[in-house]
Image: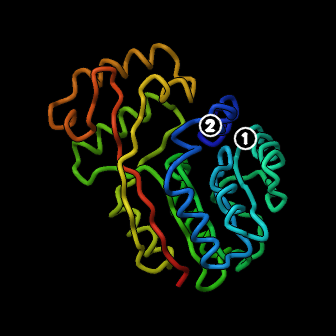
Amino acid sequence: MDQQTLTAHQFGANAEYYLTSNVHANGADLERLAAHVRRSGAVRVLDLGCGAGHASYAAARGGAGTVVAYDLSPQMLAVVAAEAGRRGHSAIFTQTGPAEQLPFEDASFDLIVTRYSAHHWRDVEGALNAAARKLKYGGTLIVIDVLAPEDPLLDTVLQTVEILRDASHVRDYRESEWRTMLRTANFSAAESHRWKLPMVFDAWVARIGTPQPRVAALSVVFDELPQEARDYFAIAPDRSFQIDAGWLEARRA
C-alpha cells in the first residue's frame, strides 16, 4: 500500500477518535483562527487536510461564507459533514483529494489553513506550490502543526517516536525548514507563534490504533532516551510528554 493510501486508511479507521480528541478538538489556536477569519473578512476558506474538521468549524464560527473541508479520507469527510450539520455550519462543504493536487480554480481562496496534517504529506513543497496557486494575491496561508526541534538529536527522537506510533507519518518539520519551503513557494516571510502541546501517552497511541508491538517498542524507546531528550520532551513516569506546536502565517507574494 502506498503512503497516501496508508494515510487515508489509518485516519479513516479512526475518524471518530479525531472528532473527540482533546488535542484536536480544543486549543487556543482554534479561537485564534476564528478571530483571524472574523477580522480579515475571509469569504472563501480551504481547510487542507481537514481531518475531523476542527479548523473548518472555527472558520465557519468566524463568519466565512464558504469553507471547503478537503481530505484524503472519505470516512473523515463523512464525520465532518455530519458534525457540521449538528453544529449548524451550512457554509461547510467537503471534497476528497490529496494536498498536492487541488481541483479548484486558481486564485479562488482568501485563506488556506492546514492544522496537524502536513506532517503526513508526501510532498509538502508540492502542496505549498499548489496552495499558492489557489490563493488570491495577498491571500493568507496558515500552517498549524507539530514543529521539530532544531537540535539534531531531539529531531531524531521526535521522528522516531512519531513513525513508531503511526506508520503514515512522514516528517515533523523544523521551523527553519518551514520558512525555507514557504519562501521557495513564493510566500512572504512567515509570522510565527509557538506553544507546548501535551500528549497523554495512552490516548496518543489509542487515537491512531497503534498495534501493540509498536506500543511496546515505543515504551522501550521512551524509557531509554538520553536525559537531555527526557528533559526537553518533559517525559512523565507514564510516558506522557510535551512537543512543540506552532502557527506559521504567510501571505501569497
Sequence-first disc among 1 and 2: 2
**How far across and down, in percent of the image, does residue 24 sit?**
56, 43
Q: Nearer the viewer, mark 1 or mark 2?
A: 2
Q: Residue at x 50, y 31 (%)?
A: 166
Query: On the image, which quarter does residue 225 sit in?
Result: top left
Q: Mark 1 packing: few (<14 Cα in 10 Å), some, or many (20+)?
A: many
Q: Quadrant of the N terminus?
A: top right
- The residue at which mark 2 appears reads as 18
Residue 178 placement (x, y as % from top left): 41, 63
Tags 1 and 2 in contact by the CB under 8 Å rule? yes
Residue placed most toward the observer, 28 or 169: 28
Quarter of the rendering containing residue 8: top right
- In this orientation, does residue 122 appear? no
Q: Measure the alpha-carbon separation of dots 1 and 2.
A: 9 Å
* Amino acid type indicated by mark 2: Tyr
Residue at the spot x=55%, y=46% of the render? 26
Q: Residue at x 42, y 29 (%)?
A: 200
In the rendered view, would you say 2 is above or below 30? above
In this view, the residue in front, 139 or 179, is 139
Q: Answer few, some or many: residues within 10 Å of disc 2's Cα (few below 14, many 20 plus, some between 14 and 19).
A: many
- Camera-nearest residue between 171 and 21: 21
Mark 1: amino acid: Met
Please provide percent x and percent y for residue 197.
Answer: 40, 44
